[in-house]
Image (cartoon, helix red, strand yellow):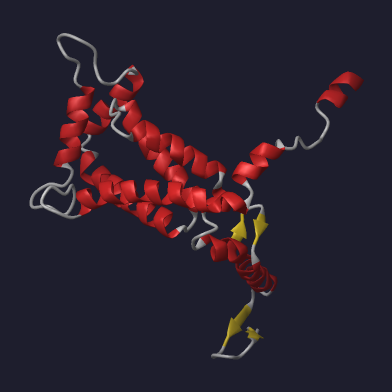
Amino acid sequence: MALFARTFQNRELRDPGVFRAIFSNTWLAPLWTLARVYVGYEFLLAGAHKVWGDNRWIAVRGPDGLALRAFWERQSAIPAQGSSPISFDWYRNFLTFMLDHGWYHWFSWVIALGETAVGIALIVGAFVGIAAFFGAFMNFNFLLAGSASINPVMFILALLLILAWKTAGWIGLDRWLMPALGTPWQPGPVVAGIAEGGRRERRAPGARRTGPGKGPVPHQA
């Protein structure tokens, strides 16, 4: 038992200095900015083609998502000769399920607006870690669907941006957003102030406000 307790005792394993220098030091912020803007530009370009233009996926005459349906049908088809673009049967079954239930009508909006939002967030450097996570998730799904293109490169860069989330947005809006909002494990002054205000309201559940600028007044019996 003593050996078990020593093995699993509460202790912090620190990252190597090289790892901290690459992902946590602002001296590499310009390099991460270039990677961030490139990934954001590619996502914005991909999303813009789906949101605007003659070949857009959404807000078209007729049903939305027909282009996405054609992509799903093409990727999930099993050819008479050769191999299918999709290597995993469970993912092919998942696409077939979505096709059978017509999910492409609303899923095309998710992809088109998601790619556009990720692109804008990465370019301006706002919530880089969250935006890179959703970007990597979309790249991963395109890879599972058998669409290579630039998705492998984008997936790797998005993963690196997730690791470098503290410095990737240093030359961007995150330089001001992160100190103000903080993180889930260390809230900033804005979030802490909102939480404190909510706690004060809960401590006076029977109170009401009678007008602007007036404090809570207890209900009369």
Q: Nearer the viewer, residue 197 or 135?
A: 135
Vertical comparison of 163 with 149: above or below: below
Vertical comparison of 193 with 119: above or below: below
Q: Position of residue 158 (x, y in %)?
A: 45, 41
Residue 87 shown left or right of residue 164 in the figure: left
- Name, please, the residue furthest toward the left: 61
Vertical comparison of 81 with 197: above or below: above
Q: Nearer the viewer, residue 102 or 2?
A: 2
Q: Position of residue 216 (x, y in %)?
A: 64, 84
Vertical comparison of 54 with 91: above or below: below
- Name, please, the residue furthest toward the top: 81
Q: Within the image, what quadrant is residue 199 found in?
A: bottom right
Residue appearing at x 42%, y 39% in the figure: 136
Numbered marks: total: 0
Residue 63 shown left or right of residue 37 in the figure: left
Quarter occupied by the C terminus? bottom right
Residue appearing at x 34%, y 27% in the figure: 144
